Each structure stands twice: as C-alpha cells, then as structure tokens.
Amino acid sequence: MPYMLTVLRPTPHLVIFTAFLLTTANAEIDLRITRPAYDYTTTNRTLAVEGDVTSSDQGEIVVSIDTPAGVARLSSISPSVHTVTTDLGGVRQLQAVLIRPSVDRGKLIGPRRILLAISEDGPLLNEHELEVSANADAPQNPVVVRLPNITSARFVRIEMLEGWSPGRILIESIEFLGIDDQIIHPIVSSVSILLDRTSGKEAPFTIELLLSEGENEIFVTATRVFPQSAEKDVEEISVRFLSDLQSATLDERRLELSDGDRANISVPIDKLDSSVKKIQFIREPLHHVNPSEYQDNTRIAPGTLPLLVYRFEVLKRANFGVEATSSLSSQPPMLAVDGILEPPSTWMAGLVPLPIHLTVDLGEIHTLGQITVHANVVNHRSYGPQRGTVLVSNDGHDFREVLDVPEFSDGVTVIEVPAPVSCRYVRLLITESKQANNVQLNEVQFFDSLGLKISRFAAFNHLLLERPALLEFNYDRADLADAGVNRETDLRVFAWIPSTHQWQLAGGEVDPARQKVRLELNYISRFALFQAVPPTELEAQWSLNPFSPDGNGVADVTQLIIPSSRALGADKNELVVEIYDLHSKLVKTLINRSTVNSNSISIEWDGTDRTGRPVNIGPYIYQVRMGTKISNGVIVVAK
C-alpha cells in the first residue's frame, strides 16, 4: 500500500518535507535533500539543490527535478546529465539541435548519442535517435545535430544515451536552430541526473535552479531505472522568491530572508530605502578565506578556524545605459527607462525627421519576452510612436530585427516577443509617430520570458539600517569539530573591515541547545562565525582610517563599528560617540546618549562638523562611551 510520511524539522521557520514512498515501508531507495534544509524566503533567484540517494543495491538510479524558471547553468548538474526537457515558449519549426558539450582537462564529456522526443502541446512523441559528433572547439562552439526533417515542436526532451567519456555526461547548453537559421533559446522545464553508484551506497547530486516570482513548489524524484522498477522516493522543496523587496506584502513590516541553509536575517523592510531592491546571500567556501585574515587576530581564539563566512550584498536600483539618435538637452534618453512611469520623467526626441531610435543596454544578456512602452499623453493627445521595429544585439554593433510593430496604442503598448530571444542590447526603431516628428516616451520596460521585469542593479557590501535587523547563524557538531572550537558558548559573529583587512568582533548570543548564534545589529555587511576571546573593555573600529571626504565618491564616508554591549556584561546602555580636535575641542557628536537597541551598531561620519561644514585635513580624537566603559582613538581625515 502506498503511504505518505510527513517530517517536521526544528528550524527557524515551519518546515514540512513530504516524502511519498510508492512501495512498501521497507523502501530500498532513500532520497535525502541536504540543501536547502527548510522552506524559506529569498531574493536570490538561484537555488542550489544538493542531496544524496542511498540504496540497498548498485542498480542505476535517476534523480529528476522540475525547474520552475529553468537552470542557472546546465554545467552545474553533477554528476551526470541523463535527460533535459525544454520548453520553446511556443510552437516553432526546427531543423537542428545545438549542443555545447563540456570539456574536462581537454577531455570531451558531452553526449555521443541522444534520443529526442517532441511534442507541440501534449505527450512527447516522435522519438528520434541521433548521433552527436565530437567537437574539437567545445565548449566554445556548439555541435549541430540535424533533425531528419523540419519538425514543429514546443516541448523537446533530450535523453543522453551514450557519452564520449565513460561514466558521465555534462553539457554547457542546449539550443535549437529554426528554419530561418535563428537560434532559439528554450527554457529548461525539468532535468534528470544519473547517479554514480560505483563509490558506495550513498550517491550525491547537485543542481542550480532558477526560481519564479512567488511560491515555488519543487519536486525531486529518485527512481530506479536498472533493474527496472516502479519504486521511487519523492521530496518537495518550497521556496518563496521575491524579485524585489518591495514586492513583499504591505503587512510584512519585517521580512525574514534566508539561504535555506545556515544564515537567516530578519530585516525591517518598512524602513528600508526604496532604492534597495534585494539582499543577496553569498556563502563563501571556508578554504577560500585567507588564514592571514584571522590567525593573528587577538579577539579570535588561537588555533581555531571560521565555522561560517557569509557575504551579504545589497542591490540598489541602477539605470540602464541608453542612447538615442535625437533628444532634447533637458530630456535625455535615460529618462525613458528610469523606472518612473509619469512625466516629467519623459524622453523627448528633438524635432527631427523620422526614423529615430532608442537603444538600451540591459547590462548583461537576458532572454527577452516582452517590452512595454508608455507614451506621454497630454490632454488626451498621445505623443507616442505610431509604428516601429524592435531590433536586438549582443555586442551593440550588429543588430537584427525581431519583430515589426505595425501600430502602437495611444497610452501603453505591450509588445510580446513571438519567441524569447537572448540579447543584451534592445533597439526601438520608431518609423512613424502619432504627432509629426514629435515623440515623447515616459517609460520603456523590459521583461524576460517568464514575465520577470529586467532591471539593473548596483551592488553594495555595507548598508546602515534605521531599525535593527536580526542575524542568525545555524551550525552543527561537525562545524565545531572542523573549526577546532573547544568553547561553544564563546561563539560570536565578526564583521569584516575592508580598510584594515581584519575581522571586528560584533557579538552575539549563543543557544547551544538549538545550535544557533543570534545578533541584533543596525548594519548589513560580510560576517563570519568564530570562537571569540571575550573582550574585557569597550572596542570600536573604523571601516576607513584614514578616509577622504572630498566628494569624489571614494572613501567619502567611514563607519565606526561597536560590538555587542552584552559581551562586556552590560545590557542596553546609553551610547555617546564624539569627535574632538587635537586641542580637545568638540567637533561633532555622532550619537548623544542614545539607548543601544541592538547588540552591534555601525555609525557613519562624513567628515563634517556640527554645522555641516567639512573639517580640515588631519588627525582627530574620537571617544566612545557606553555606560562606564570608554574607548579613545585617532581617526584621520585625508585628502
């Protein structure tokens, strides 16, 4: 009898993994997802799925995963690709498959024979077994695999029957060639991985998926293919993806973000600057961390290693690069793609003969699915285009036509790209206008093949918050052993100071029973988990010292990081931070008797005095007072 097993795991969020075993209770296949460890919310579009399968024998097992928005890289699949199912976005006429095989140490590890199953809208039929030739230029150039005849298809499944190297098959990409010699970039809807069972009963696997906006329910299935059996094991992963922090619901004053593994952060999004769109989690491999960064640090227990290192990247909205054949000096072309839908943010072409064009640099290659054009309408009169053409390019020089737009709406025109096309540059060529030689556009928006808005971001590695965030790291016994930790209760969070190339103690509270370290702080940066030597006095460290607040955009502001007051045996003390000149004259008070509501805080100084005027170049004395604890030092203002 089939049965369903539900497992609840103690994690920061409610976690439910459901495993469906379709045979008896004594299942011979055991599928285990090791990452992500729980359901979570993220602004990282890429999801790394890691797991392993154990079985009572050495039979062949395939792990299949449905991919909500495709895969980040087909080459991320490990250990061996078995099947790739693709969606072309619509019925297309195909003449060939383009496969870029992987190469490892000069050895070709791509497929040698494949089996294609094709469908326009239903079950996959019309199977074709095809030979894939060796490619000396792989993976730079694809292998062209010709179909027996021109075939109509939307869904195509490619099964790897045989590889050029025994044991595994890896590929870089799969594309298709249309009858007009146009390259078609499909979306990968699911993949299957053939596990390597030669090294023992436990067989690991890895794949990086792309997430769709909102809730993503992802099913991972392990199936025995040889000897053939109906036995299978299924697990479900649930991940909520936000393409933009502002897309969170209005009642979420605090948003809990995670990587589904070791790091969680609760952020007060109602106080975030609207330009902050994402907070990305990047876990750094421990072997990539230079030991010189921490070996001589007197605040880190001698002989110990980091347990975890995470870099948090804050992404703020940035503008696309834009060019136009005509514009007014007061209304440059960048106003057409600045994210503001209403005038006066409007690009206006000069009164010049048509055609004119607007060329947008998306910053990187995207799969373009839709363009939305917002025309400026004044007193019910539209100043938008009447007719135009969309062209694309990858290098900004060679453009090719994608489609003709015979008629634009008066207000908003939604242009659907018939087949998703990969490009970096998009050119809107306007051949006719609704008002003679007068074109005014409020906004042009771009969306990918899955309907996600294409945006450009600028990355920052430090962000100050108006209200404290709660950072939480999870660890296990293996982490403690690997790091050489002998006092679990001394685990603390450290913040990285780039200017001094040192880890600064930030603090934290350890919960050994739940194996967590929690820290309230008013900034987001690069953090690590170490065994600390508890401080005996108040410490503070500047991110830049010296710094040069000359307005050139480099080192204009420095941050003073003050670790947890609780590490000193204090709790919620009043904090005073003051800057003095060398004659002991007060220059500026950065914080005056403010109650510390977070365990670790960061304070900015822009090099101005109490009146807001820039201070002179030279050394200054800073003083930090928290309760009865006092710390003094020198901060230098340079050119």
Image (spheres, rainbow, N blue to C red):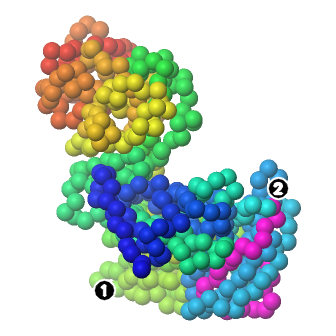
Q: Is residue 452 left or right of residue 138?
A: left
Question: SS for tag 1?
Answer: loop
Instruction: Characterize the local packing of mark 2: few (<14), some (14-19) or many (20 or more) Cα atoms within 10 angstroms.
Output: few
Q: Distance between the Cα atoms at labels 1 and 2?
A: 65 Å
Q: Quadrant of residue 627?
A: top left
Q: Which mark is residue 66?
A: none
Nearer-the-camera pick, 284 or 510: 510
Q: Residue at x 60, y 56 (%)?
A: 201
Residue 349 x, y percent position in the rendering? 49, 72
Nearer-the-camera pick, 610 or 114: 114
Nearer-the-camera pick, 265 or 589: 265
Q: Residue at x 71, y 88 (%)?
A: 127
Does residue 175 show up? Answer: no
For the N terminus, the quadrant is bottom left
* Residue identifier under label 2: 107
Instruction: Characterize the local packing of mark 1: few (<14), some (14-19) or many (20 or more) Cα atoms within 10 angstroms.
Output: few
Q: Which residues are magenta?
A: 141-165
Q: Is residue 17 left or right of residue 82?
A: left
Question: Does 150 appear in magenta?
Answer: yes
Question: SS for tag 2?
Answer: strand
* Residue identifier under label 1: 380
Q: Amino acid at mark 2?
A: Lys
Residue 180 x, y percent position in the rendering? 73, 86
Q: Residue at x 56, y 29 (%)?
A: 290
Residue 431 x, y percent position in the rendering? 57, 83
- Seen in the picture, residue 412 relative to 112 is either above or below; the reply is below
Question: Does 192 appear in magenta?
Answer: no
- Seen in the picture, residue 537 relative to 114 is either above or below; the reply is above
